[in-house]
Image (tube, rainbow, N blue to C red):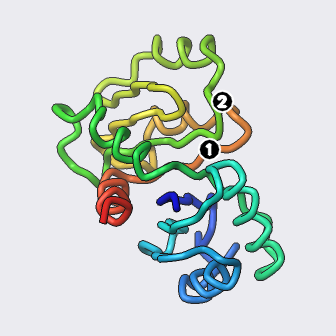
Amino acid sequence: MARLVALLRGINLGPRNRIAMPDLRSRLEAAGYRAVQTHLQSGNVVLDTRQGTEKAARAIEKEIHDGFGLSVDVIVRTAAEIGDVVAANPLGEVATNGSRHFVVFLSEEPDGDAIAALEREDFEPERLVARGREIYLWCPDGVRDSRVMKAATRQRLTPTATFRNWNTITKLHELASA
């Protein structure tokens, strides 16, 4: 069995795409996933399965569609990949507040030219560092008016992207490592 972390995009934001986490856990357990845990209400799931990441992502999307009538994109990483995201944090010395430090998870490796263009922009005091299928962001004044967050999410770097703050990422790492 593989330990996976599923990141659901755009659920429980205001009144749209509402899914109760107990109902999601039950649905995924009934579909054969084991040790299903959720964290917060924003679509963070840790589970065990024999499926690979891509197969699990598509199967979870189908379960959400069939069970809740919602079309929700899902990005899946292995527990080891989440551990690598935490260990490789290129903004660790700068990002001093976990609620303002973010990682954008991309469904696939982004176009190098698009990333290079983003990295050339001056966002000071904000920061952006791309690494593989993740983009690390530091938004010291918060996300609402963040120029770096807007720049990182305005382009369609990959078909699907979703972001989490550092506090959530480290908690998911803890859950996935248990």
Q: Residue 161 carries which label?
A: 1
Front residue of 4 and 43: 4
Residue appearing at x 42%, y 48% in the figure: 143
Residue 44, percent across and down?
Answer: 50, 66
Q: Which amino acid does label 2 sit on?
A: Leu
Residue appearing at x 74%, y 73% in the figure: 64
Q: Is residue 129 above or below residue 81?
A: above
Front residue of 81 and 123: 81
Name the secondary structure under disc 2.
loop
Q: What residue type is labelled 1?
A: Ala
Q: In the image, is 175 to the left or to the right of 97?
A: right
Residue 21, percent across and down?
Answer: 54, 82
According to the picture, the residue beneath numbered tag 2 turns out to be 157
What quarter of the picture does the C terminus occupy?
bottom left
Q: How far apart are marks 1 and 2 (CA)?
A: 8 Å
Residue 112, percent across and down?
Answer: 60, 14
Q: Which mark is residue 146?
A: none
User: Mark 1 touching mark 2, by CB under 8 A?
Assistant: yes
Q: In the image, is 139 to the left or to the right of 103?
A: left
Q: In the image, is 48 to the left or to the right of 100?
A: right
Name the secondary structure under disc 1.
strand
Q: In this view, does 101 lie above or below 35?
A: above
Question: Tag 2: Cα neighbours inside 10 Å, few (<14), some, or many (≥20)?
Answer: some
Residue appearing at x 58%, y 65% in the figure: 49
